[in-house]
Image (cartoon, rainbow, N blue to C red):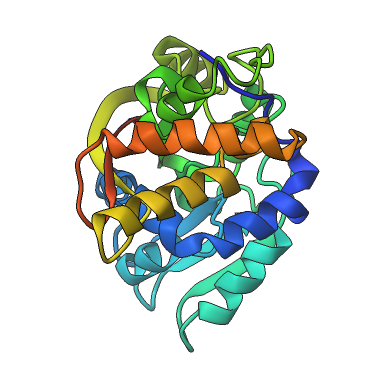
């Protein structure tokens, strides 16, 4: 499956972080069903203390805070300063939330300080996932819970499969390591379970979650396809595959990707298939 190498961690405070921030509305629409499924699996309770790993702009942090209530507290951590600043600015006055720019894999965390560790697509980028989850488990109370959503394989997700397949005869795919840090590092179900077991978690469950997601948006079908194409060029593997390509190659790629999106249904957005794991475990 054509793809590109994963983003270096520092890039989340550079161009890629800026692109993600600029596309928040589109990305939240795309990820909405996955986030809601993960929140339901997490089942946050009033009074709980929660760590939101890779919180981004706070899209999952604020619903967690609503569940935790005034007697609870949610700490959102993310490596992107741009996204943390957006989250802080959006935080309602008096909400039981705090945002910190930090890497949850290594950041100082209170020992046995949380009832729940949660993440919406924020745990697939760790250089050493066993060490990262071991570190975070140390911040979980005895009997505490872990819940996160992560992507399955690239071949199962049309937001990658469609554009990358469309350009395979235009741009030579870069070699990749499927287990390298990146969006699809947790695509293998058994690998996810093995990582969590090695980190000391128990009662591990890795359940498939499939949905038809809305990619891009527009007042008309043509507008939606145009917006989907623009989004693919700004964030994700296609944007990285074409980053250093000349204008003629980018133009050919745009035509090919637009044709691929045009084959999918949808009037105000392009409807494509998405596939993830909903993962739960206990300390």
**112, 54: nearer the viewer:** 54
With respect to residue 100, does 107 lie above or below? above
Q: Would residue 226 appear left or right of 172 to someone viewing this image? A: left
Residue depicted at 37% across the width and 62% down the height: 64
With respect to residue 27, does 203 lie above or below? above
* Number of numbered labels in the structure image: 0
Provide residue 251's location: percent of width, then percent of height: 60, 38
Which quarter of the picture shows residue 6?
top right
Q: Would residue 255 appear left or right of 278 to someone viewing this image? A: right
With respect to residue 269, does 100 lie above or below? below
**229, 248: nearer the viewer:** 248
Provide residue 89's location: percent of width, then percent of height: 58, 80
Q: Would residue 41 appear left or right of 26 to someone viewing this image? A: left
Residue depicted at 20% across the width and 47% down the height: 266
Residue depicted at 40% across the width and 24% down the height: 152
On-image quarter of the C terminus = top left
Provide residue 167's location: percent of width, then percent of height: 53, 23
**13, 22: nearer the viewer:** 22
Which quarter of the picture shows residue 222?
bottom left
Residue depicted at 51% across the width and 43% down the height: 232
Q: Is residue 56 visible?
A: yes
Q: Is residue 135 visible?
A: no
Residue furthest front as drawn: 248
Provide residue 170's location: percent of width, then percent of height: 60, 20
Q: Would residue 30 appear left or right of 82 to someone viewing this image? A: left
Residue furthest bottom as drawn: 93
């Amino acid at each position: 499956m054509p793809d590109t190498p994963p983003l270096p961690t520092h890039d989340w405070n550079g161009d890629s972080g800026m692109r993600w921030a600029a596309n928040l509305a589109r990305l939240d629409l795309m990820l909405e069903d996955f986030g809601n499924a993960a929140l339901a699996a997490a089942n946050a309770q009033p009074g709980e203390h929660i760590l939101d790993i890779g919180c981004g702009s706070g899209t999952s942090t604020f619903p967690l805070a609503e569940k935790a209530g005034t007697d609870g507290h949610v700490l959102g951590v993310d490596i992107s300063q741009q996204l943390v600043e957006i989250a802080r600015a959006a935080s309602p006055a008096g909400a039981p939330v705090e945002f910190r720019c930090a890497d949850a894999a290594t950041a100082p965390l209170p020992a046995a300080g949380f009832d729940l560790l949660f993440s919406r697509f924020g745990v697939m980028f760790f250089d050493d996932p066993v060490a990262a989850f071991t570190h975070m488990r140390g911040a979980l109370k005895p009997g505490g819970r872990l819940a996160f959503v992560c992507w399955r394989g690239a071949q199962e997700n049309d937001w990658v499969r469609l554009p990358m397949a469309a350009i395979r005869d235009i741009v030579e795919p870069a070699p990749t390591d499927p287990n390298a840090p990146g969006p699809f590092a947790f695509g293998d179900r058994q690998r996810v379970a093995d990582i969590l077991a090695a980190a000391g978690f128990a009662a591990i469950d890795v359940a498939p979650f499939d949905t038809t997601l809305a990619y891009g948006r527009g007042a008309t079908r043509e507008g939606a396809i145009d917006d989907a194409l623009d989004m693919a060029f700004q964030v994700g593997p296609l944007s990285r595959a074409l980053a250093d390509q000349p204008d003629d190659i980018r133009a050919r790629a745009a035509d090919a990707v637009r044709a691929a999106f045009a084959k999918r249904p949808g009037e105000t957005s392009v409807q494509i298939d998405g596939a993830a794991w909903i993962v739960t475990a206990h300390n």
